Image (cartoon, rainbow, N blue to C red):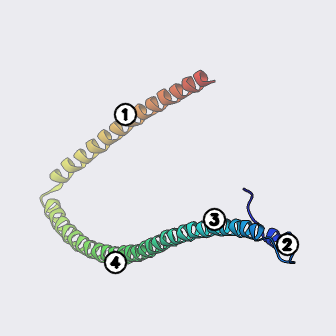
């Protein structure tokens, strides 16, 4: 059965009866069509209303979720700010303590150096010799590490070139 349109209702014509009235049978059939179409539209409208209600619930859920996320972000930002503030305060304390300890260490070192200088030139010469040995050892180790790193870099570059050559 084709859907009934407003134009169908507007243009319907009923056969005239001998007493200048409409055929009751045709009017009844037409009313049946109107009723069926109205019922279909009513059901469709109810379905659409249900879908709209469900969609509004989903939207409400997501708006609530959005608010929750926004408040979580605000809390996280405040927490981060507090954490940074606390970290800065702690860092200042650590720096202050470290400076104080460093000053004590420097003072102690100066006192020890004075004692060592007073013990004589022989001790000083021995320390200078140890320092020279340490410097030489440092240079030796540095050169060894430098050579090892250069070798490793060459191996890596070679491997990379081999890999790129195989890829092509």
From the image, tell me which residue sits under label 1: 144
Mark 1 Cα shell of 10 Å, populated few (<14), some (14-19), many (≥20): few
Tell me how far mark 1 sits from mark 2, CA to CA: 121 Å
Calculate the distance from the C-alpha at mark 3 to the C-alpha at mark 1.
91 Å
Is there a contact, CB below 8 Å, between mark 2 and mark 4?
A: no
Is mark 2 in CB contact (under 8 Å) with mark 3?
A: no
Percent position (x, y) of residue 49?
Answer: 56, 71
Q: Where is residue 112 in the image (x, y as percent from the top left)?
A: 15, 63
Q: Distance of mark 2 from mark 4, alpha carbons?
A: 92 Å
Q: How far apart are marks 4 and 3 (CA)?
A: 62 Å
**Image marks 1 and 2: residues in contact by CB distance under 8 Å:** no
Circle number at residue 82: 4
Any mark on residue 40, and which? 3
* Pair 4/3: label in front: 3
Query: Which numbered disc flags the more N-terminal residue, 1 or 2?
Result: 2
Give the mark, 2 or 4, whose residue is nearer the N terminus: 2
Q: How crowded is mark 3: few (under 14 residues within 10 Å), some or many (20 or more)?
A: few
Q: For the residues carrying marks 1 and 2, which lies nearer the camera in this image?
A: 2
Task: Bin the neighbour count of mark 2 within 10 Å (Cα to Cα): few under 14, some 14-19, many 20 and up.
Answer: few
Camera-side mark, 3 or 1: 3
Instruction: Name the residue at 39% across, 73% down.
Output: 72
Q: Please, what secondary structure does the residue beneath circle 2 have?
A: loop
Pick the front one: 5 or 21? 21
Q: Quick one: quadrant of the N terminus?
A: bottom right
Mark 1 and mark 4 in contact (Cβ < 8 Å)? Answer: no
Nearer the observer, disc 2 or disc 4?
2
Q: In this view, does 33 lie to the left or right of 159?
A: right
Q: Residue at x 24, y 70 (%)?
A: 98
- Picture quadrant of residue 140: top left
Q: Residue furthest front?
A: 18
């Amino acid at each position: 059965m084709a859907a009934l349109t407003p134009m169908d209702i507007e243009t319907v014509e009923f056969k005239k009866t001998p007493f200048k009235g409409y055929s009751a049978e045709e009017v009844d059939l037409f009313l049946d069509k109107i009723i069926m179409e109205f019922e279909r539209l009513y059901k469709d409208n109810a379905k659409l209303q249900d879908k709209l209600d469900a969609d509004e619930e989903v939207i409400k859920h997501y708006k609530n979720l959005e608010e929750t996320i926004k408040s979580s972000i605000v809390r996280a930002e405040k927490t981060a700010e507090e954490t940074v503030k606390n970290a800065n305060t702690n860092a200042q304390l650590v720096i202050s303590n470290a400076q104080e300890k460093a000053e004590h260490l420097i003072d102690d070192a100066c006192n020890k150096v004075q004692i060592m200088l007073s013990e004589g030139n022989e001790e000083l010469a021995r320390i200078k010799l140890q320092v020279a040995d340490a410097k030489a050892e440092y240079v030796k180790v540095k050169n060894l590490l430098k050579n090892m790193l250069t070798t490793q870099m060459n191996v890596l570059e070679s491997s990379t070139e081999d890999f790129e050559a195989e890829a092509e």
